[in-house]
Image: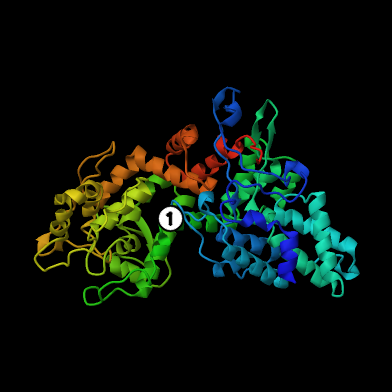
Amino acid sequence: MLKRLCWRVAPWAVLLPGLACNGAVGDGAAGPGGVGGSGATSGVGGSGGAVVLGPDGTPLGPPPPTVIRRLSYTEYNNTARDLLGDATRPADSFLVDETRLGFDNIADAQTISPVRAEQYMLGAEKLAKQAKAGAPCAATGDAACAGQLIRELGEKAYRRPLNEAESTRLLGVFQTGSAGGSFEHGVELVVQAMLVSPAFLFRVEEGQPVPVTPDLLRPTSWEMASRLSYLLVGSLPDAELFQAARQDLLTTREQVRAQAERLLADPRAKANVEHLHTQWLGLDEIDPVRIKKDASLFPQFNAEFVLLARQETEAFLEDIFWNAKDGAKALFTGSHSFMNAKLAAFYGVAGPSTDTFVRVELDPARRSGLLTQAGILARYAHARQTAPILRGKFVREQLLCTILPPPPPNVDVKPKEPTPDSSTRERVNAHVADPSCSGCHQMLDPIGLGFEHYDAMGAWRDQDGGKPVDATGIVNGVTFSAPFNGVPELAAQLAASAEAQACITKQWFRFAYGREETALDANVLASLQAGLKASGGDLKELLLSLTQSDAFMYRGPKVEAP
């Protein structure tokens, strides 16, 4: 019965592949705030001559594109928890989210296959059976009570008030489910229908005209509530944000900033920032299943070590985001970390004597920020030796936002086996001598070879292949290109560079807006980067600035569906 009902109630056609980003998504006639109308689309900035206005009313340029975003599976789990009180993380059993640019919330990658649609339907069935979606009037068991529950729960599920057509349709679902059954069964089917609706699964925006420039659109207060909430806490708006939307109090930068500052104090914000760090820096890869070492060479290495190393990096990133005023620089140059007794023994430093993680000061000549932490170093290394290519690639792609081409076809990428009398540098230099490899390897190897003081597990070493370690290197092709000796010197160069700061800004931009930057975003990115520099590298301020940008406050003009 559920399948027959869902196919009648929810417009499943919009869940076909290719319509997730720019297809018409709507449940009926336009509702409050101009949301929910048929033919709602994602506008493309720049058409129709619309422009974004500066604070003084002067044109700044065309508004950036606006995309229709599907809830990522992390957002789906969080929303199910906050909507229905369900903490079972149902989306963990779904197909893995597609990623692009390292993130799972990029709209261009969020297609809907028949398998995903089926999983949404089964997930809705399970959630509805367990839902804590009762109504105060449930004892009466009548249609009036069902109507009240539909309005109240529907507003939260769709992140806006239901329009008349939606309310009527869902009341019909209730009547179908309760006929010959019970009030509870009718409510269960209503919850199922809501959870498979595009209004729940997608963040649909139509916007409203800006009074002084009708060709320019901005999100309604309801839409802005969702923008804020999913950016900052990764879930649906809370009661205070919904109330602000009802009162249309999310239209100015000041109103948006005040709510953003409030939401940063929400415990869910910490989990959301951690999720960003995990995706941007690939922390999921610091996993015992993915990292393997030769036990004869690295007897200390085991699954517990990997998990402790990941915990260290997570604690460090949390600290520099929430506590450091110069977090964008401390990411590279921080001379402290967090560890327990076992990690302190590995690093060879005086530290705690228990399993509790505490802050530990490190020798800045040997350890400098993220790049010298065991989890990152072990992840970007082979089982028996270091991997300068992988370590250089991590710096290039994640910290400098360089797009590298794939290796040529038929190239043997297997590393040469180490020998007692050869160093890693000697073996790697063979790549640069090969004309088919030298182009890319000049971008990677001179960076990665600067990591040679750290073995495949991340421990400090002075010798490699019976020779003193040579940790000199250079970052080619950047404005700050200059020789360095060891990672602390490399880290200092990155911390002071405009390129690394620009990359940090881009990574946050992509996560915040669910898309890759375009030429239309040049002004926004320049403003964000300038703000980050002016703040001294305060990452919290960068996150707040993302809520104040034109890309956040405005959207492209509405494009009617053909």
Residues 155 and 436: in front is 436
Residue 8: give x, y in percent of width and height: 75, 61
Residues 232 and 558: in front is 558
Residue 239: give x, y in percent of width and height: 72, 53
Number of marks present in the image shown = 1
- Quarter placement of the C terminus: top right
- Quarter placement of the N terminus: bottom right
Would you say residue 43 is visible in this rendering?
A: yes
Mark 1 surroundings: few (<14), some (14-19) or many (≥20) residues within 10 A: many
Tell me: 558 left or right of 273: right
Up the image or down, 70 lies above or below 346; here it is above
Residue 94: give x, y in percent of width and height: 56, 67
Residue with the mark numbered 1: 317
Up the image or down, 356 lies above or below 522; here it is below
Image point 42% across, 39% down: which residue? Answer: 536
Tell me: 258 left or right of 428: right
- Farthest residue in the front direction? 562
Residue 335: give x, y in percent of width and height: 33, 53
- Is label 1 in a helix, a strand or a loop? helix
Would you say residue 358 is visible in this rendering?
A: no
Up the image or down, 439 lies above or below 318; here it is above
Question: Disc 1 residue type?
Answer: Leu
Image point 87% across, 65% down: which residue? Answer: 137
Q: Quadrant of residue 281?
A: bottom left
